[in-house]
Image (cartoon, grey):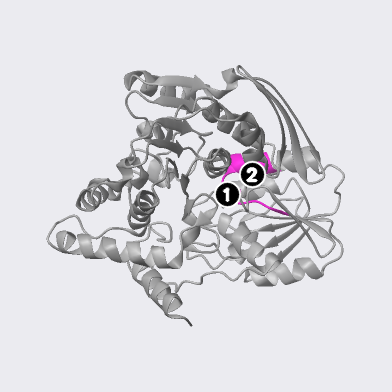
Amino acid sequence: MSKINNKYKSTINSLLSLTDFERKKNISNSRVFHLKRIKSALKLLGNPQNTPKFTIHLAGTNGKGSISSLIHSALTKNGLKCGLYTSPHLHNFRERIKVGNNIISMTDFCDIYEKIEKTTSSFFQNSNLGSLTVFETLTIMGAIHFENNNIDVQVIETGLGGMFDSTNIFNSDISILTPISLDHTKILGKTLEKITQDKVGIIKNNSIVISSKQKPNVLRIIKEKSFEKKSTFINVEENIKGFKQHYESEKLHMNLLTSNDSYKIQHPLIGINQSINVSTAITCLENFNLIKLDKKNIISGLENVNWPCRGEIIKKYKKLFLIDGAHNPSACRDLVKTINSFFINQKKILLIFGSNSDHNENKNIKILSRLTENIIFTKSRHPKSVDAKSLKNISSFDNIVESQITESIKEAFINSTKNQNYELIIVTGSLFVAAEFRELLLEIKPEIYETNEL
């Protein structure tokens, strides 16, 4: 192993010694989330998050990663130096921090982490704030990397919620609220209104606020917060005057008419919900005012976006694999609509399903079981993953005729790829299940982290 690989492994181990709410099994309440630690650290580091000329910040339940990636791709195609910060990662931590088409290098990852440690450790040892968390540290790393690369624009996806999410230290010029539904209710609240109140916390004074398609009570709260912050509110549904799409040759062919222009796009991500994602991205790009964007480059960026495990189609072993990280009832309903709309001729369908404990696995299985009688229940290596036997036990629905239990994604992969009975294999229920299956399908070597009791 090279010196940099050794240093990188050591850095990852150090990072994972910090509190990690993404992998922590039990979070008692939302009071553990606040911005005091990260603001203190950023001040010591010279507030790098304020350096870029323009910031786009996204919060929501579904689609925020896809929309972030679409916007980033289109801005990059327009010649802007654009940073992208997303979570969680699929195969390695470095994917979360990207400038242009390049993820952060091992060297930069290690050097920036070391800089944060050296600059802040003494302060936190002598304060009552505790140490930085994994997500706080990565957010700071993203801000420093973007400053080091002198980027023009930063596109920032929230991790969880909005108001007290670590990314809310970015002062956004455009705030985007993607479709909001019930998810992470133990932390964000048990009602749609409470969850929305948390997510609209990203809206800044005198900014532009763009909302995707929402339920009426959600839209009302977003409008009220926009008015309170003296910000311009734009409803994507009102901006889109016409939209048609059909599936052909493993792409979605879209015809879209806005208040300002028309677009023809061949979109690589497959999903009934991609109409909302593309519409939201285009609405944002039409209201981007740092420079005038070229329409051809916008379309090229949207058509060449790379965002794996979200409606991703892979052909291998004479089968069609649909890899999608749907993990809440809303996303699972969209996945069912996708299959019924675009894969109506696929009669032999196998569903591979795994879940994390903070997802609504009972309801998700009930929704997805409408697709097929054949399900493999499985378990990812993530610390929060639910045991496959437990998933089968809670899925007592009459239409599940043939179900299997596998103790690992590898076992599910072997069973599904060897079986010649199925034309379409859908891998879903968790982004971590989707990512792990994708690693095996495409022979990607992932980062494997030690699992501590969390």
User: Residue 30, can we see it?
Assistant: yes
Quadrant in the picture for the C terminus:
bottom left
Please check the rendered image and state whether residue 159 is part of the magenta-colored stretch, yes or no. no
- Write down the region rendered in magenta: 322-335
How crowded is the residue under tag 2: few (<14 C-alpha within 10 Å), some, or many (20+)? many
- 261 or 59, which lies in front? 261
The residue located at (36%, 59%) in the rendering is: 134
Kindly identify the amino acid type of the residue bearing the numbered disc 2: Cys
Please state if 267 lies on the left or on the right of 79 as rendered: right
User: Residue 136: image x %, image y %?
Assistant: 33, 54
> Residues under labels 2 and 1: Cα distance?
7 Å
Marks 2 and 1 in Cβ contact (< 8 Å): yes
Give the mark nearest the N terminus, 2 or 1.
1
What residue is disc 1 on? 327
Q: Which residue is mark 2?
A: 332
Which quadrant would residue 394 be assigned to in this image? bottom right
Q: Where is 26 relative to 49, above or below?
A: below
Q: Is residue 53 above or below residue 129?
A: above
Q: Position of residue 44 (x, y in %)?
A: 20, 52
Inspect this view and state whether residue 357 appears: no
Q: Is residue 368 left or right of residue 133?
A: right
